[in-house]
Image (cartoon, rainbow, N blue to C red):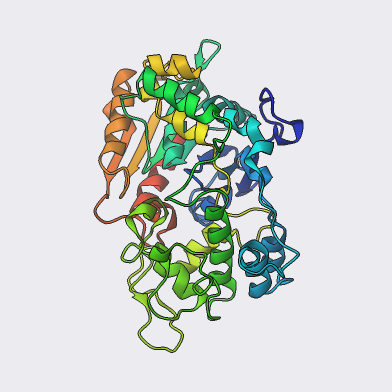
Amino acid sequence: MPGFMAPGTPAKYNQVGVIKVGPARAKNVLVLEPGTSAGSAYFVPLAKWIVSTVAGWQVWAVERRENLLEDQSVLTSFKEGKATATQLYNYYLGFLKNPSIKHHFQLIPDSTVEFAKQWGLNVAIEDLHRVIGAAKALGGKVVLGGHSLGGSVVTAYATWDFNGRAGADDLAGLVYIDGASGPSAMSAQDATNALQALAAPKASPWLTFGGIPAPFTGLYNGSGSAAALLDPNEPSLGQTSGLLPKNIVPPVRVTNVGQYGYALNVATSPPSLIAAQAHLGTGITTSGPVHGWNGTGALTPITRYTTMFSGAGMDNVDGTEWYFPQRLTEDTRAVNAGNASPAQNVLGLHATMGHKLPKNLLIDAFGAALGGPEVPAAARILATQSQIPSRNLTLVNRQTTYAHNDPAGAYPHNDFFDQLVPFLQKVSAQS
C-alpha cells in the first residue's frame, strides 16, 4: 500500500506491505511489527495458529519498505520447485568464490542508496500509520504488537504525537514480544554522534547484524532456511564454501538442515547471534557420514523455524530483512518510554505522549532470552505513566526457558501463545 513520502526517497520505495492472514470478514486486526533484520514472513506460522484459534481476528505482518530492495527471484524459483539447491546457493553465495558463475545476485553499492540513511523511526512510524489506518477501516479493534526492536516501535507508535493525538488512541491493545522501550534514552551527544557517523561519506545505511554485514544475513538465512526446509538431506554447500562465519560451521560434515540447526540452535549458536536463536532440538545427529538434525526436545520445531525464515509457500518474501536501516536502530534508542528527551529533539522524533495513553488500553508483555524481565517492567512503566490499571496488564517473563525467537516459533506448546489467546479474547469483549 502507499507509504510515507519520505524526503529524498525515490517514489518506488515509498510503499509498505503486509501479509494478511485470516478471514477477510474478520474485523479485528493484530498488526505485528518485525524486529531487527526480520521480515514479515517470520510471523506467518504464528499468525495462522492465532486465526485458527481466536474467532473474529486477522493478523497482518508488516513488510517494511527496505525489503523492496531485495532480489527474491531465485529464492522464489526454488520455493516453487523451479530451481535446485545448487542453483539457489550459486546465485546468492557461490559466485563470490567461483567467478565462472555469471548469473548471480548483484550487490547494491551503498552510494546508490544514500537516501536510506533517513529511514529511521519517522519513516517507519508514518508507514505503520498507513497500515493501522487500513486495519481500523475494517471497523473492529486494532492491536499493535512487535518482536524485539519491533517492541520499541510499538511504544514509539503508541506514544507518537499525531497532531495532538497519541497513536494509541486508535488502538485497543499493545503486545510486546521480548522487546520494549524502557524509561531511558541515549544522550543528546550520543544522538549527535550517531547522526554524524551515519552521515560520513563511506558510512553504510545498513546495520551489521551479529557481525555480518548487509545483505549477507539475508543471503545466508534466506537460502539456508529454504534449503534446510525443502532439500534438508543434501550435503550442505554452505558448510564447505568458506563463506560462512567459522563459528557457525559444524565440526563434522552435515546436511542442509544440520548446518541450519547448528548455526541457530541455542546450544551451538554463538553469543553474537543470540537475536537469531531458538531451541531447535538436541543437535546434529550422531550417525554419518553426512550428519542431519535431531529435533528431539525442541521448543521450536526446525521445520517451523525454516518456514518462518524462508517464507515457504509465498513468492517474493521471506522472514529476514536483508537491508536493515542503521538509522532505525539509532532512533529506537531515544524512545524513552514515550517521553520527550534531548535525544529525541536531536533526532527529530515525536514519541512524546507517554503520559497520555487511553486508560482502557490493554497491554500484553512477554520476556524471553534477550529482553527478559525488562520487557514486562517496561510495559508496567508505560501503563503507570498514563494511569492504566494493573488489571489491564498481562505480564510474563520466561527468560531462562525461551530463546529470543521461541515466542513466535514454539509449537505445539507455547507459553506466549497461551497468554496471547485470552488477551485477544479480552480485547474482543471490551466495550
Q: Residue furthest top?
A: 164
Give me the residue at 36% from left, 68% from top. 298
| Residue 232 in which image quadrant | bottom right
Give me the residue at 31% from left, 19% from top. 385
In the displayed structure image, the side of residue 130 where residue 147 appears, left or right: left
Q: Position of residue 339 (x, y in %)?
A: 38, 17
**62, 197: nearer the viewer:** 197
Q: Is residue 290 depicted above or below 396 in this figure?
A: below
| Residue 390 in which image quadrant | top left
Q: Is residue 431 depicted above or below 255 in this figure?
A: above
In the displayed structure image, the side of residue 180 where residue 171 appears, left or right: right
Q: Position of residue 356 (x, y in %)?
A: 40, 15
In the displayed structure image, the side of residue 338 where residue 368 appears, left or right: left
Residue 429 showing in the rendered view: no
Give me the residue at 75% from left, 31% from top. 11
Give the quarter of the figure containing the N terminus. Answer: top right
**298, 31: nearer the viewer:** 298
Q: Position of residue 224 (x, y in %)?
A: 54, 65
